[in-house]
Amino acid sequence: MSTVLVSGATGFIAQHIIKQLLEKKYKVIGTVRTDAKGQHLTKNFNNPNFLYVLVSNLATPGGFDEVFQQHPEIEYFLHTASPFTLSDDNVEENLLKPALAGTKEALTSAHAYGKNLKKLVVTSSYAAMGWTYLVDKSIPDDVYIDEASWTDIPWDVAAKSDGLTAYIASKAHAEREVWNFKERETPNFDLAVVNPTYVYGPQAFDSDVTEHMGETSEIINRIIKLQPGETPHRDRGLCIDVRDVAGAHIIAMERDECTDKRLLLFNAAFSEQNFLDLVHKFYPEQFKNVPIGDPKTTQATLTKTFWGDIHNEKTREILKQDWYSHEKSVKDILEQIIRVRGL
């Protein structure tokens, strides 16, 4: 039975990864910040093959050293943990530096103490691939984005920017450190990186359906709380089901053909009007007070040119996954919310 270390085990993506790993009979060690969070996960997973370890601050020098020293049996490391905030407050100290430091510490500890480590898979983001245009707020007509594309926002520019721009830059700088590390240190373990767009889908456990939910699921959560006469925001983008993102991490971990690859994950375009349409399609009675918006604009709100010309054919060919349909993902989110809230 192989052992997998998953950092940031309480995260939305990480919990789905751990569920799938346990279903595949792996032993999983998850890092958490507090005992309370670890105990909560232990109760939810209810599996003797899961245990947690404390790593209170991912950016602390040597933060992962003890984990590898105490668990030399670790063969795979899925590094999903990364700071996420869009706050404009001191973005260099609160976002850029922690993101880069956390990645460096994971790599350094794995290299120094991961005696039996075979592969390290890092969760990056589409943000690291195609968002350079945020600096001047315009998208050139000839933008073409694929697995080889990079966001190029200099550190000094990001440090003086708003929270969104700094977050996007942080993902690019952290991921570049992964590939620079490989070239600089030539570690004995293999590397792969997973780059999802917006991640949505049901929570791993019903207990995680709270008043406020993270990731793209919160957009739907916010929509179903709209009052008559209110209009949706104009959020839109590309998305991928969290269960497929989790599966992609495991495929990247298991398959040699994923080594040294950046895997760009998206399966559909969404907009808030699109979500509204699906809310009323699937559960019109439960959400009859939610406004319908303006359905005739749905197709226009899904125009992908907002994001540039994006391609992930190489990723699809490597992974060969049967991804959840967009409608299935939305329906599963709504079904879970209705069940938990008794709607």
Image (tube, grey):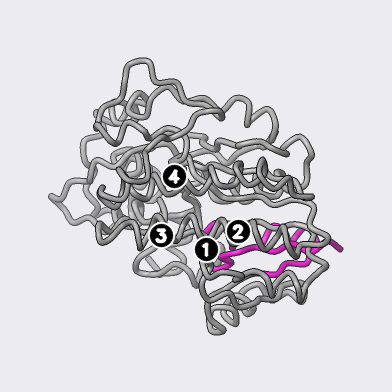
Closest to the observer, 51 or 297: 51
Dot 3 or dot 2: first in sequence order is 2
Real-space CA distance between mark 4 and mark 2, rounded to the nearest whole angstrom: 15 Å
Mark 2 neighbour density, 10 Å: few (under 14) some (14–19) many (20 or more)? many
Q: In the rendered image, which residue does mark 4 sit on?
A: 198
Q: Helix or strand or loop: what does disc 1 sit on?
A: loop
The residue at the point 17 percent across, 46 percent down is 231
Closest to the observer, 286 or 108: 108
The residue at the point 50 percent across, 59 percent down is 101
Q: In the rendered image, which residue does mark 1 sit on?
A: 11
Closest to the observer, 2 or 336: 2
Q: Helix or strand or loop: what does disc 2 sit on?
A: helix
Residue 327 visible here = no
Mark 3 neighbour density, 10 Å: few (under 14) some (14–19) many (20 or more)? some
Specify the farthest residue to the right: 1
Real-space CA distance between mark 4 and mark 3, rounded to the nearest whole angstrom: 11 Å
**Does 21 appear above or below 60?**
above
Q: Which region shows up in magenta?
A: 1-30
Dot 4 or dot 2: first in sequence order is 2
Specify the farthest residue to the top: 142
Mark 2: which amino acid?
Answer: His
The residue at the point 29 percent across, 42 percent down is 235
Mark 4: which amino acid?
Answer: Tyr
Label placed on residue 16 = 2
Q: Position of residue 197 (x, y in %)?
A: 47, 41
